[in-house]
Image: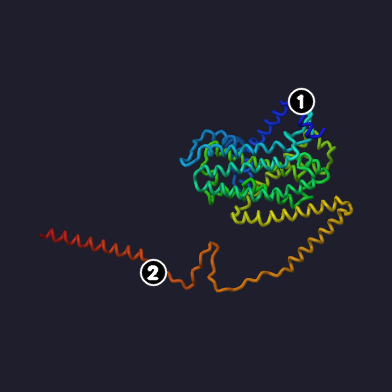
Amino acid sequence: MTRAELLADDPLWLILMKAVVLMLVGPILTVVLIVGERKIVGRMQNRPGPNRVGPFGMLQSIADAIKLPFKEQVIPDTADRKVYFLAPVIAVVPALIGLAAIPFGPEVSIFGERTVLQLVELPVSVLLVLAGASVGVYGIVLAGWASGSPYPLLGGMRSAAQVISYEIAMGLAIIGVALYAQSLATGDIVEAQASGWYFYLLLPSFVIYLISMVGETNRAPFDLPEAESELVGGFHTEYSSMKFAMFFLAEYTNMVIVSAFATTLFLGGWMFPFVGLDSPLNQGWWPVLWFFAKMAVLLFGFIWLRGTLPRFRYDQFMKLGWKVLVPAGLVWLVLIALVRAIRNDGNVSTGQILVIGGIAIVVVVLLTLLIPEKRVEDDDSVPITGGGHPVPPLDLKVPETTPRSKALKAKAKSAKRTAALASTKEGSDGDL
């Protein structure tokens, strides 16, 4: 039986069990990730991190989860209350739905019932995961708008532009995988990697996806919708208590989803490296361990980036998306389609394709070296700084006094003169 047939044959109790487990994966991993991130970044920055609550501070996230619901809720007077309350829910729910189409393992037996470790298998499961990861941006945009404050609104607008830009690049990377696997079903994509993982067969797609998934989840160095150096706290500035915690839950759950998705698309899913599907390492419950180990490596990458790279400027960030990732994704997609068409013809071997590709790369490099450098023409215009303001002339003389200082001195003299006249008058009155 195929994966879809096994899932269609699942009894109701097994479907409910899988749904409950998937609903718990996001919150449980969020608790673990918050403590892990604080400890790892603390280690990178030569400080201890949380070390008070529980052994080695491991219960700090549980303490925060207990504390946040009991904190006071502060709601701005200018907020649209209905949308204000709805926005965190919109951010969290789609993030949890995306895990439904991720295959965590092969066929197993649960209480005597044959099934696969996946909730749903659709012909377009890839689009379901992508949609679940992207719909959450509506929660961020609505949170920024409903707060009735300028800084959250700017953060929400940034998030909309950011997700649109990087989702295009992410989609182009996914199309390359779909062309190679000839399917949009996540289970079929994992099985298609039995002869080779796509992270090295489709290395440019993998790199584009890794960069795009960081921009998609609003994580540093791409955390511009919540940049505290510019926007106080960004889209969640006016949120507190449990609603603030829900945005954190959505962020970390989205990290889990895009990491699980990258594992499925490029890292062989639940398969152990260098062995076939018939190996004991790829049977039973062992593949679940391999899947979460690969996902942990990608999640560590998120933390590593946050601890080492500074935040991008917004113009740099958008330029990277529109002028680098999207054109590179389009060119790479055309090359994939060309290679697939040549290979399907059957008259060209893999070695010949590599030789032709190498020659093409050398020709492109040589052409770029032949392009003359752009000559900068000298002009007599006033140089400007990065902010667009003219540079003061070198012979600038700063006046010793200003109109305001003159006025203040005149006022002080007038006050002294008035005081002197008053004292003189008092003296003359005393003599009389």
Between residue 306 and residue 365, name the one nearer to us: 365
Q: Is residue 44 visible?
A: no
In the picture, measured across the screen, residue 160 lies left or right of residue 281, that is: left
**Residue type at numbered disc 1:** Phe
Q: Quadrant of the N terminus?
A: top right
**Residue type at numbered disc 2:** Glu
| Local crowd size for mark 2, using a 10 Å CA cut-off: few (<14), some (14–19), many (≥20) | few
Outermost residue toward the left?
432
Image location of residue 297, percent across then percent down: 71, 44
The numbered mark at residue 400 is: 2
Figure check: 283 above or below 334:
above
Q: Nearer the viewer, mark 2 or mark 1?
A: 1
Q: CA distance from mark 2 to mark 1?
A: 90 Å
Say which label, 2 or 1, has the lower sequence index: 1
- The image quadrant that residue 399 belongs to is bottom left
Q: Residue beneath label 1, please?
A: 111
Between residue 193 and residue 1, name the one nearer to us: 1
Q: Secondary structure at mark 2?
A: loop
Residue at figure coordinates x 82%, y 51% from the top left: 340
